[in-house]
Amino acid sequence: MTIVAKFGGSSLANAERIKNVAGIIRKIKKESDVVVVVSAIGDTTNFLIKTAREPTFVDNAINNLYSRHMTILEQIKKPSGKDKSVLKSFCDCIEKRLLIVQEKKVQLQEDIDYISGFGEKFSAFILSCAIEEMDLNAKIFHGDDNLIFTNENFGDGAVLFSRTNTVLKKVILPALKDNAVIFSGFVGTALNGKTTTLGRGSSDYVASIIGAALDAEEIRIYTDVDGIMTADPRIVKNARVIRKIDFNEISELAYFGAYVLHPKTIKPAMEKNICVKVINSFNTDSFTEILNNSPKTDAPIKAISSKRNISIINIRSLKMLNSSGFIARVFGAFKRENISVDMISTSEVNISLSVDEQNDFDCRIERAICNLTKFSSVETRKGKTLICVIGEGMRHRYGILGKIFTIIGNNKINVEMVSQGASEINITFVVDDIDADRAVNALHEELINGEIK
Ligand code: ASP
Ligand code: MG
């Protein structure tokens, strides 16, 4: 039996927490083989990215990186000369690249990927020391050492699965028996051999890729919260942990990732039907299980999520009446600018769609709108929030839509756009930013705390 266990930066933030993680791994290893996927310690990735972007005080940055990791290592063991030289070799590689960047005065995304990928190398090494202190062998692998293959889209590499899966099986399986395998998340190898990253927060995804490639029994994402919650606990004070949730529900809950799981994590696990557990590393009794066909509960609604800073774009044209190809033209304008659209709703002469202001509301949107105005009238409304109500139990149940909008109406909140997919497991709508938290709380109170039946 193989378990893939991923630990995030806050679970590894200091020596005490790293020892706690090593203890969890020892426990798992007693019963199963284990691949441990790590993120960088604490905020190291942010620090590395910032340094790569502004490589002004290279010496200071390198000293900072060496001492922050050495301080932790010293609290775990008495570092040997070899341990010191490992940390030093990482620092030397970073320094060398920073000096090149400084010299050429521009940094490419591939420089940022190479430099920021070292956070996971430090943490993998330090965790392996903590594990060895517990008399367990540890063997380290790095995703950018020809193990996770991606295309050359630096900063957001797309995984080349067939090659990756073959290599992972060949390299990792033989190491499992005698070692706790430690795998540095976040990075991959482009076909030209350069280091890529798979996007911020992607170590969860790496765990899922490895779990699927090795046909693991379980993929455990250890984090600093009790699991996936019924709502964002920063918005809803009495939000609670969802014990079991379906892959379908979690994929519809597109915005859950903002605070728990990298959204791409679901697909590899779902395809291989491997259970994903989101576990609190400080309280391992508390977790959420994500499964195929999770047992149906009476409560039709599982979770309510929201995503702020949305803009609605309204496109209106009489040319749409009885014509084909109009929608393709509209989406062509967004595709050309590489803008991702979240929500869509259409009528005969009108298309409304929502885009994320933070990532996308810039000149690319302006250009897309400019193109759209050539054949339609366009109106944009900013400062909106998308609210998503999720639950498999909503399928084929009548009256739920009515309940949701009665609650919203009773709270005198205006709904600006609505969409329900044919899968019937989510209802998504848009309200004004200022009404959003009130709407989520009211819905949570009645639909989840009140558990409508
Ligand atoms: N360390 C990387 C990041 O901060 C990857 C991860 O944490 O999953 O984005
Ligand atoms: Mg994370």
Image (cartoon, rainbow, N blue to C red):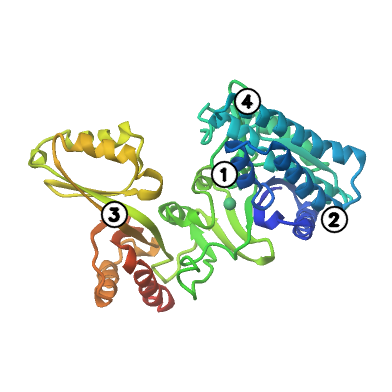
Residue linked to disc 2: 75
**Upstream in the sequence, badge 3 or badge 2?**
2
**Disc 3 secondary structure class:** strand
In the picture provided, is 406 more to the left or to the right than 177? left
Asked if the beta carbon under badge 1 is closer than 8 A to the nearest atom of ligand 1, the reply is yes
Eyeballing the image, is 440 above or below 105? below
C-alpha separation, residue under disc 4 versus residue under disc 1: 30 Å
Q: Mark 2 packing: few (<14 Cα in 10 Å), some, or many (20+)? A: some
C-alpha separation, residue under disc 3 versus residue under disc 2: 50 Å
**Upstream in the sequence, badge 2 or badge 4?**
2
Residue linked to disc 3: 382
**Upstream in the sequence, badge 2 or badge 1?**
2
In the picture provided, is 217 more to the left or to the right than 16? left
The residue positioned 31% from the left and 34% from the top of the image is 335
Q: Mark 3 packing: few (<14 Cα in 10 Å), some, or many (20+)? A: some
In-front residue for pair 324/170: 324
Check the image and name the residue furthest to the front.
56
**Disc 2 secondary structure class:** helix
Check the image and name the residue furthest to the top.
192
C-alpha separation, residue under disc 2 versus residue under disc 4: 37 Å
The kind of residue tagged 3 is Lys
> x, y percentage for residue 310?
34, 53
Camera-near label (2 vs 4) is 4
**Disc 4 secondary structure class:** helix
Number of marks in the rendered image: 4
Residue linked to disc 4: 103
The kind of residue tagged 4 is Glu
